[in-house]
Image (cartoon, helix red, strand yellow):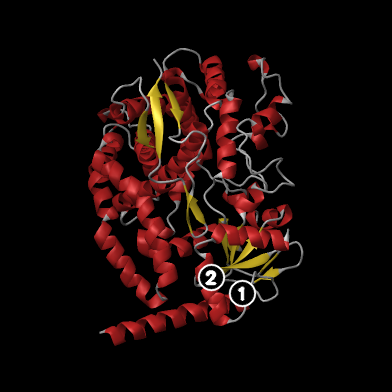
Amino acid sequence: MPTVLLVVSLLLIFFATALYERGRRKQLELPSLGFKGIWASYSSSVTDAFRANEAIQESCRKYGDRLFTFAQVGQWVVVVKAKEFVQDYYNAPEDVLSMEIAAEELLQLHYTVGRQFCHEIYHISAIKTSLNQNLTDVLPKMVDEIVRGYADVVAPQLADGSEWTPIRALDTFTRIICRSSNRIFVGLPLCRNEDYCQLVSQFSSDVLLYGPIIKFLLPAFLRPLAGAIFQRVFRHHQRMLKHLGPMVMDRWKRKSNADDGEIENDMLTWLMDTAPADQEYSVESLAMRMLNVNFVAIHTTSKSFTHALYHLASKPFYIPILRAEIQKCLGDGHPTGWTKEALGRCIKLDSFLKESQRLNGMGALWMPRMAMDHFVFSDGTKISPGTFVVTAATAVHEDDEIYERPLDFDGLRFSTIRELRNDPNDLDHFEPDSDNDWKHRLTGTSPHCLSFGGGRHICPGRFFASLELKCLMAYLVLNYDVKTPIEGVRPADEWFGPMSNPARNAEILFRKIV
């Protein structure tokens, strides 16, 4: 048995190394940092998996704005940093540089999610149109669920509201965000169902963990088997279908009979309206769509909010600044009376969240694309089909030629820029959509600010996510004081290869405002 395992291991290393070096040979004209020879380069890529951010930053310092290649385990990628190159590739057509195929390959979505769902992306249309068009209408429901979430999840952890109490931030706010998002996705009472919330919250973690394992550690012929095991063990599809199946059937019945009452205005209804009429597995497809919508919404929003909370707790002097603005803009009424326009005037809050995303994003490499055809950058560099292209997002966001004091957290960095174009004391005449102002808003993007992507594949749900983040933080600032257990020390990010996460087990001290 040990001999068999040794042979299998050597074969896996051989296949991975051969594929890895073949990818390198495709881009021999581009520089790479310290990789020489097949085995040396492969071993270096394994080593750099544990220090990916530092290795990428080192490459960016060495090569400046030039394109370069970077090795991940079993795969080479072309890395972009300069503004003109970022614009080159994030505006490329999907059939030339594909975001969808890149995501499928990197997360092995054919096997983790299911082959039949990879090319059914009608949920994107539902987000771009129905969700964004209904933000004003759904905002009171989302805020109501946020208030209930704080009451049900945070308040019980505070034994004595007037005393400082430690709370595990990521777990706590993932639960609240799951509820508030799904209040808009599936409505009451399902958004508060513990099994449903556990399912949709865990789905993204499972895919993000096991997808790369399947890709980078298994040869292609073993991936279908691994995918079948993954789906059989976790049963995401079956569990989601159990929750949503009866709801879908009930809504179809009511839609066919106009006398059966008004249909709920939520994501499930929008997906039903958008879904192709001839789908063979329409109920199962709708259930899978909802998992995919939750995949992005919960994962990204919970990470973004936790990062921002860690900044706030380690720099509590921002609390009175934000509190004063929120009280002025949102008033003293019940939070369900908050409006999209009033939240838009909270430019310091908006800036604080944007600055947090700048310094603590999704990882050192971002916006992956796979070349489906030959692609030529503006400097003449040609990449071949099958090549991955990524942006060195952390290096861009920490570039001292773009941002002053780029490594320092300045929660008012972007609001200061916006205030130069407006009178911050004249809220009635503040122009949030004035020339170039949009670039400095939380939802604004540019080749220098990549948190929500950009170009043809800019995040369609960024307006919903922005409102949710603002409401979560506004309610926290109005009702709680927070600080870190060690004064001024922010919990360090956790890195997995080139991807980063807020510290999973870190605790933040909460105290209810009396």
The residue depicted at 62 percent of the width and 56 percent of the height is 392
Q: Nearer the viewer, residue 120 or 217?
A: 217
Q: Nearer the viewer, residue 255 or 222?
A: 222
What type is the residue that disc 1 sits on?
A: Phe
Which quadrant would the N terminus be assigned to in this image? bottom left
Residue designated by label 1: 35
Residue designated by label 2: 45
Residue 77, by quadrant, is bottom right
Q: Nearer the viewer, residue 17 or 43?
A: 43
Q: Secondary structure at mark 2?
A: helix
Across and down, in percent, residue 265 comes to: 38, 32
The residue depicted at 47 percent of the width and 20 percent of the height is 338
For marks 2 and 1, the one nearer the N-term is 1
Position of residue 114 relative to residue 361, above or below, is: below
Q: Secondary structure at mark 1?
A: loop
Q: Which numbered dot is residue 252?
A: none
Tell me: 256 left or right of 490: left
Tell me: 443 left or right of 180: right
